[in-house]
Amino acid sequence: MISLSEEVEKTPSITDYLASAMLSYSVIFLWLKVSSIMEISWGISYLFFYAAGLGPTYLIISRITRNHFPVAMISVFVSWVFTLVCLITFTQGDPTEFFKTLLVFYILGGLTASIIIMRRRLSPQGTVG
Amino acid sequence: MAKSLKLGVIMYLGMSWFLDDVEISDEEVEEVILEAAQRIKRYGMEIPAIMALESFRPLMYVGGELTRLTLAPFLPFFGSNVDMWGQKLITVFEEKSNVDKLILLLEQMSRGEYEDGSVGDENKPEDSDEKEKVDET
């Protein structure tokens, strides 16, 4: 007989999502400031976009017990919208390509975070949350 | 042209309407869940499967009904076994609790905690005690 456990599932609150979005934005903002001061290759910026998606999402989903992938995608989307709203006033010209690239790397970061957490959850001694 | 199209749609919907509602016992439900879990495990697709199941869990009923409407009428062409298995799959995984059971089973299989018939079975220790008592007598 397959029976389900009665334990209450933890779900992130709006505050958690906003905190994650602020952390993502801070990474992007820091990178943009540094790249405007120093001459750094734009190739490294993709690494920062990826890290801005991966880190905060990992922090959010490591606190919950299940539904990691949907929560990661919600977190990524909230982060992207937050970054879009905050950065749209600072950008000149057409920033569509920049925000599209940012979304792609955020999604890749969120996907990686959820795969890492899922591997931990499915490992023999693994406990998440 | 329009009339025949309407008639075709009505016949199609009527056919799909009459083909649904397979009565499945609890044992059969468990068999279907176990079979699905074993197939996923065989292909090493536990992580993508759990991700997809958790993501689409709220839409399972809608997905089941859409599958019943679009795919189920064509299942009999592939043989009675495929038809029966397809109907069972649709009926079982329309319910969210069964999806949760499948996720739980996949987790237990991946962790190596799964033994035949012991998935989350709270009665197992009592059964084993009873067996020991029977052995002693």
Image (spheres, coloured by chain):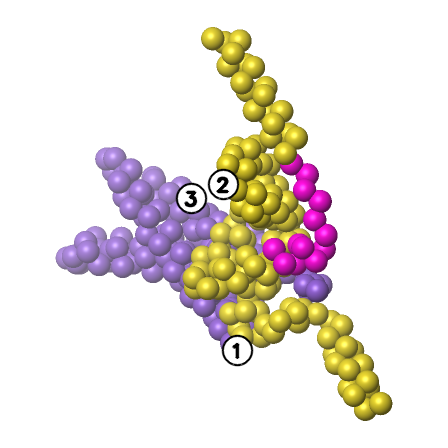
Chain colours: A purple, B yellow
Query: At x 81% / y 85%, what residue is drawn?
Result: B134
Mark 1 Cα-neighbour bin, 10 Å: few <14, some 14–19, many ≥20: few
* Left or right: A100 as drawn, with respect to B41: left
Residues tagged by mark 3 and mark 1 found on one chain of the structure: yes
Q: Which amino acid type is marked by label 3?
A: Val
Quick check: can you spot residue B58?
no
Q: Mark 3 points at which residue?
A: A81
Quadrant of the rendered structure where residue B23 is?
top right
Helix, strand or loop at label 2? It is helix
| Location of residue A128 in the rendering, given as x and y in whole percent from the top left corner | 54, 69
Q: Is residue B27 magenta?
A: yes
Query: At x 51% / y 76%, what residue is drawn?
Result: A124
* Left or right: B22 as drawn, with respect to A110: right
Instruction: Please provide the residue range marked out in magenta.
Output: B20-32
Residue B81 image label:
none
| Location of residue B120 in the rendering, given as x and y in whole percent from the top left corner | 67, 69
Query: What is the quadrant of the C terminus of chain B in the image?
Result: bottom right
Quadrant of the rendered structure where residue A23 is?
bottom left
Residues tagged by mark 2 and mark 1 found on one chain of the structure: no
Query: At x 53% / y 52%, what residue is drawn?
Result: B53
* Left or right: A104 as drawn, with respect to B46: left
Q: Do the residues labelled 2 and 1 touch (CB within 8 Å)?
A: no
Q: Mark 1 points at which residue?
A: A125
The mark that comes first in sequence, 3 or 1, is 3
Q: Is residue B98 magenta?
A: no
Of residues B55 and B5, the one drawn nearer to the viewer in this rendering: B5
